[in-house]
Amino acid sequence: MNEAVRALEPKALWNHFADLNAVPRASKKEERVIQFIKEFGEKLGLPTHVDEAGNVIIKKPGTKGKERMTPVALQSHLDMVHQKNNDTNFNFDTDGIKMKVDGDWVKADGTTLGADNGIGVATIMSILESKDIPHPPLEALFTIDEETGMTGAFELKGGLLDAHIMLNLDTEDDDELTIGCAGGVDVTATGKYASEAAPQGIKGYRLAVKGLTGGHSGTEIHLGRGNANKLMNRILLENEGTASASLPSRAVASGTRSHGKASPASACLRTRCRPSPRTSKHYAIR
């Protein structure tokens, strides 16, 4: 399946991307991809260093005539958002991403693709390997755990880089330069509840919302795609007093990553009656 991707131009870029996507690299589980990038730099005969956090730094001298130019750092992160469809059999701890070419797009089969930030990593790999691209002294910085805490960036110590210019290759459009970005905040809310046995005559049902396209919660927020969180709550609200009558409690689970629009969601319902024909017709109760 990935051979169609390897045949794309420029081949150096897409082959490095395919090689990278063969290595499991979920956030906070980057041990194998760290070793992969380390060995890549060493095979090129370039100075390669892994810092205490797990960031990999590979340095390449400037090409002829550019040896004394200002060094430039090229930065991308090694980890990827690991998310799959409910009906996809895939283990992010052991499996490589299965890719396919669909028209003008490269897509993954039932999982996230890892182009964020795999394309940036593959681009840097291509430049480090190249023998015909003029460039100043380069410092390739591959950071870890960007998606779930920016751990690599925060734990990068001073003195490891000499560059005065850094290009971050984690962006959306290859013909634009961005000089700033917005921050983000993670919020974790916890609470306690008392459990109780279901009264006589109460039946349990599992309501599922699935098969949505999903997407990035930032760059694709304007596309109007369904959000499983919102859809599930609308269903529960609409059916209050019908399928969900006499609901002293219900549990809702949805989404697995803060960067992605929730595509699956499920709710556990307790009711004294079977779902109404209207509910059964519109929603899959199981």
Image (tube, helix red, strand yellow):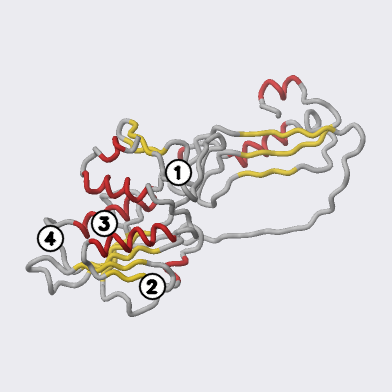
Q: Is residue 69 above or below residue 277?
A: below
**59 with respect to 88 (left or right):** left
Question: Residue 51 placed where, x, y %?
Answer: 38, 72
Q: Is residue 117 above or below residue 5?
A: below
Around disc 2, counting alpha carbons within 10 Å, would you say few (fewer than 14), some (14 to 19), or many (20 or more)?
Answer: some
| Image quarter of the N terminus | top left
Which residue matches tag 3? 125
Type of amino acid under label 3? Met
Identify the element where label 1 is drawn.
loop
Give the mark nearer the N terminus: 2 vs 1.
Answer: 2
Q: Which mark is residue 51?
A: 2
Q: Secondary structure at mark 3?
A: helix
Task: Give the residue at the far bottom of this rendering.
Answer: 159
- Name which residue lies at 72% across and 34% down: 206
Question: Considering only order in the chain, which callout, 4 or 3, is on the residue closer to the N terminus?
Answer: 3
Q: CA distance from mark 2 to mark 1?
A: 28 Å
Instruction: Examine the image and state in which quarter residue 193 appears.
Output: bottom right
Q: Are marks 2 and 3 in contact (CB under 8 Å)?
A: no
For mark 4, does the 10 Å Cα neighbourhood hold few (<14), some (14 to 19), or many (20 or more) residues? few
Find disc 1 in the rendering and name its residue: 112
Looking at numbered disc 1 in the image, what kind of residue is underneath it? Thr
Q: Position of residue 79 (x, y in %)?
A: 43, 56
The amino acid type of the residue labelled 2 equals Asp
- Residue 254 in percent (x, y) is at 62, 44
- Disc nearer the start of the sequence (2/3): 2
Which residue is farthest right?
200
Frontmost residue, 22 versus 27: 22
Q: Is residue 133 left or right of residue 192?
A: left
Residue bearing mark 4: 134
